[in-house]
Image: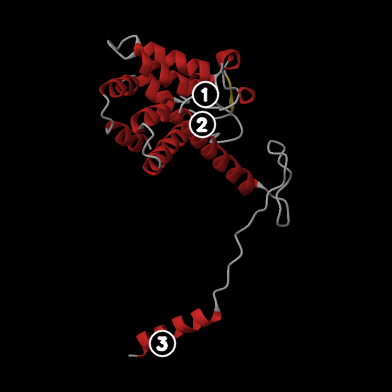
Amino acid sequence: MMKALRDILSGLQNVHLKALIERFFADKQFVSLFEKAPAAKNFHHAYTGGLLEHTLSVCQMSIRVVEHYPRLDRELLLTGAFLHDIGKIRELKAYLQIDYTDEGRLLGHVVMGVAMVDEKLRALKNFPQELAARLKHLILSHHGQYEFGSPKRPKFLEAFALHMIDDLDAKINGLGHFMEKDRREGAWTDFNRLFDRYFLKGETLCIEKDQAETGRTDVRQGKLFSS
C-alpha cells in the first residue's frame, strides 16, 4: 500500500506540493507511524494499517473524481487526500487496543495535522502562502460540518470533493465491517446506533432475464458447441 501511495504522489508536477510530500516521506519516524496507525478507534479502518489503507483509498478515489470533474485541481486534491488524516498518528495509539492519546483528546487529529504541515512548511523556502492556506483548509474542513468536528466547512471545490470522498470511504468501510460482524438471524442487521437504523444484509436478488432473450442466447450457444 505504501508503494502504491508513493507511486500516485510521485506523479505530481507542482514543485511546491511535491517538495512538501517528499519532506513527509523523508521523515522515517512519520513513515513508520503512518504505516502502522489505525484510522479510527471504532468505526472505520480501526485496525493496524487502517490509516494507510484509508489514505490510499481516498487518493485513488480522488483520481477518479477528477477524471469525472476535470475542473478540479488534481494535484491540490491529491495532496489534501494524503495529508487530511496525518494527525491521527499522534491522536491514536494502538498497543493491546486502540485508544486516544492525551494530546489526541485535547487537540484532535485535525488541529494536529495542520500543525504537522506547518512544521514541514517552515523548512521549505518560498512556499506560496495562498497554496499553504488552501492545503490547511482541506485538512480543517474535511469533516464537513461543525457538529462532526470540523473547525471549518468546505469553502472551495476541492475541499467539498475531499470531504465527500473521505466520508464515503469511511462509511463504506465502517458499515461493511458492521454488516460482516452482525450475527443476528434474518435479513436485517441489529440496530446501528450510529446511523439510527437497521440495515438490510445479504446479496441482491438476481434479476431474471427475459425468456425470449434467454432463448436466443441458448440457440446461439447450441450452434456454437454442436459443430
Q: How many marks?
A: 3
Of callouts 2 and 1, which one flags the residue occurring earlier in the amino acid sequence?
Answer: 1
Of callouts 3 and 2, which one flags the residue occurring earlier in the amino acid sequence?
Answer: 2
Residue 150 vs residue 47, the one in the foreground: 150
Q: Residue drawn 34% across and 30% down?
A: 75
* SS of the residue under disc 1: helix
Residue 102 vs residue 212, the one in the foreground: 212
- The answer to which quarter of the image holds residue 9 is top left
As measured in the structure, the alpha-carbon distance from the residue carrying label 1 to the one carrying label 3 is 60 Å
- The answer to which quarter of the image holds residue 103 is top right
* SS of the residue under disc 3: helix
Between disc 1 and disc 3, the foreground one is 1
Numbered badge on residue 51: none
| Disc 1 target residue | 141
Residue 121, image x, y percentages: 35, 13
| Disc 3 target residue | 222
Q: Residue drawn 38% across and 39% down?
A: 66
| Disc 2 target residue | 163
Residue 209, image x, y percentages: 54, 74
The crowd level at tag 2 (other Cα within 10 Å; few <14, some 14-19, many 20+) is: many
Q: State the residue lying farthest toward the bottom.
A: 227
Whether pointer 2 and pointer 1 mark residues with C-beta atoms closer than 8 Å, the reply is: yes
Q: Is residue 93 above or below residue 220?
A: above
Amino acid at dot 2: His
Amino acid at dot 3: Gly
Residue 54, image x, y percentages: 47, 35
* SS of the residue under disc 2: helix
Q: Quadrant of the N terminus?
A: top left
Amino acid at dot 1: Ser
Residue 203, image x, y percentages: 60, 59
